[in-house]
Amino acid sequence: QVQLVESGGGLVQAGGSLRLSCAASGRTVSSYAMGWFRQAPGKEREFVAGISWDGSSTYYADSVKGRFTISRDNAKNTVYLQMNSLKPEDTAVYYCAADTKWRRVIARTSNEYDYWGQGTQVTVSS
């Protein structure tokens, strides 16, 4: 079993930055692709960013491309999401997830991920 715990969320003004962390425990995630998703009130959970097991490949939703950066430190069993130039529409609960299956491309739908964290709230004020 893998436990994922997100942290780093909070309230920030538009244009500001936040860095989310996702710490894994129970098992190393160094061989798993990892992803970040978000869910705003009344909306479905959406893919934000994903990273391959070794960090060599990343993929971003168009809405965050150029503003968010996903990275990982396998020695620390931790994945990060650096969020810059935040907008009010980025307000959501952010979740990290682990994909335990080998794939040619980074998974972009929630049903492809096997383990989830509890989420961290990000609120961007205008």
Image (spheres, rainbow, N blue to C red):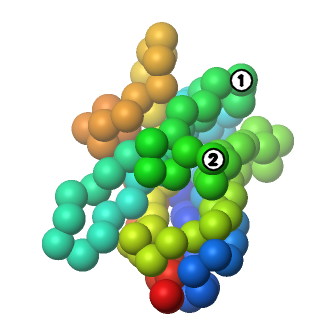
User: Where is residue 21 drawn, in percent x and y?
Assistant: 66, 62
Question: Badge 2 local density, few (<14 within 10 Å), some, or many (20+)?
Answer: few
Give the residue displayed 71% in from the left and 23% down from the top.
Answer: 56
Residue closest to the far right: 75
Question: Which amino acid type is shown beneath numbered disc 1?
Answer: Ser
Look at the image and tell me whether residue 3 can be seen: no
Left or right: 103, with 22 as reference point:
left
User: In the structure shown, which secondary structural element does the residue marked by tag 1 occupy?
Assistant: loop
Query: How far apart are the two marked residues, 2 and 1, measured between alpha carbons?
Result: 17 Å
User: Where is residue 45 drawn, in percent x and y?
Assistant: 28, 56
User: In the structure shown, which secondary structural element does the residue marked by tag 2 occupy?
Assistant: loop
Give the residue displayed 71% in from the left and 44% down from the top.
Answer: 71
Most foreground residue, 12 or 57:
12
Q: Is residue 53 above or below residue 5?
A: above
Residue 53: image quadrant is top right
Left or right: 6, with 70 as reference point:
left
Most foreground residue, 1 or 68:
68
Question: Which amino acid type is shown beneath numbered disc 2?
Answer: Gly
Q: Earlier in the sequence, mark 2 or mark 1?
A: 1
Residue closest to the far top: 104
